[in-house]
Image: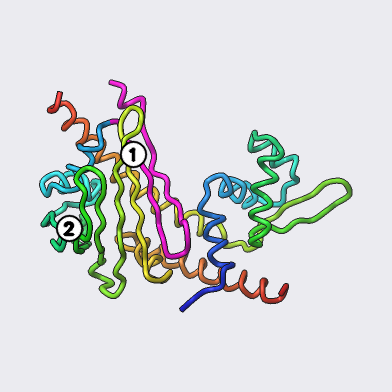
Amino acid sequence: MARAATTTDVFNAIAEPGRRQILDLLVHGELSVNELVEQLGLAQPQVSKRLHVLREVGLVLVRDDGRQRYYRLNGRALKPIHDWIRRYEQMWNERFDALDELLEELNHEED
Amino acid sequence: MATLVNKHSAVVTLPIDTQIQINRDFNVPKELVYRAWTTPELVKRWWSAGHGTVTIADIDLQVGGMWRWVTVTETGFEVAFHGVYQQLTANELIVCTEVYEAMPDGEALNTITFSERDGGSSLTLLVQHSCQEHRDGHVNSGMESGMQTALDMLESIALELLEAAAIKA
């Protein structure tokens, strides 16, 4: 069953750690661009670029209030998606950490 | 020992909605990483990641040869995967199918690339599923059933976004 491209785009959007960082911050509520820049510790163009991608796939919504621009999450269930990837990452991290130990041992044998 | 200082993390990305990609750097030459993936007694020492015991690690390392790895968790739950090697280049590349035996319909194609980098090597595992449901099932495999809730949420989010897109269009 083929899916609309939107879904793919959303998966792409949340697959990139930098964009997930923004979603993570917005989980706690609406933030202005300045607040995001400040909290991420990045240059504004970098933050704007990430926000643009998230906006394009509809993961964040924008609201203009005077001269400030506020962003908020679209869909309260975004956090489980994030957690879902994190859980998978965690499983592989544990696996690779175990592999590291073994590799170190093999590496010593080679020396 | 520099290894402890130089600790790496796995990076998981979802390049498209039927793929999962995992990247990880190592502090040893790629030949050793390849050996750890292709030697039964070595696979048994890391595959379960401390969550149970790898009871079977069959590897018939040739094109057309089969592999089957079985883990038994502390609670006695059996997690088994098997597949067939399709392409093998020693120390460089493994292409093989993968079936999670609890969901035998969802066959994936794994491409594991071993490459050199400064100070060691790097591994990329690309899992290609035939459809998104299989991928989601894969991510869910061997994990607590609580994950299903998250996946259901994911589904509803996707639908919500599709509806939103339809309204805008």
Residue neighbourhood size for the residue with mark 1, other residues' Cα within 10 Å, grouped as few (<14), some (14–19), many (≥20): many
Q: Position of residue B22 (x, y in %)?
A: 38, 49
Give the residue pinned by disc 2.
Answer: B69
Identify the magenta region. Answer: B1-27
Give the residue pinned by disc 1.
Answer: B122
Q: Are the residues under badges 1 and 2 in a single subunit?
A: yes
Whether residue B101 sits left or right of residue A92 in the image: it is left
B86 is within the stretch colored magenta = no
Compared to B23, does B158 lie above or below? below
Residue drawn 33% across the image and 59% down it: B143
What type is the residue that disc 1 sits on?
A: Ser
Whether residue A23 sits left or right of residue B77 in the image: it is right
Does residue B55 appear anywhere in the picture? Answer: no
B19 is within the stretch colored magenta = yes
Give the structural element (helix, strand or loop) at label 1: strand
Q: Which chain does the numbered disc 2 sit on?
A: B
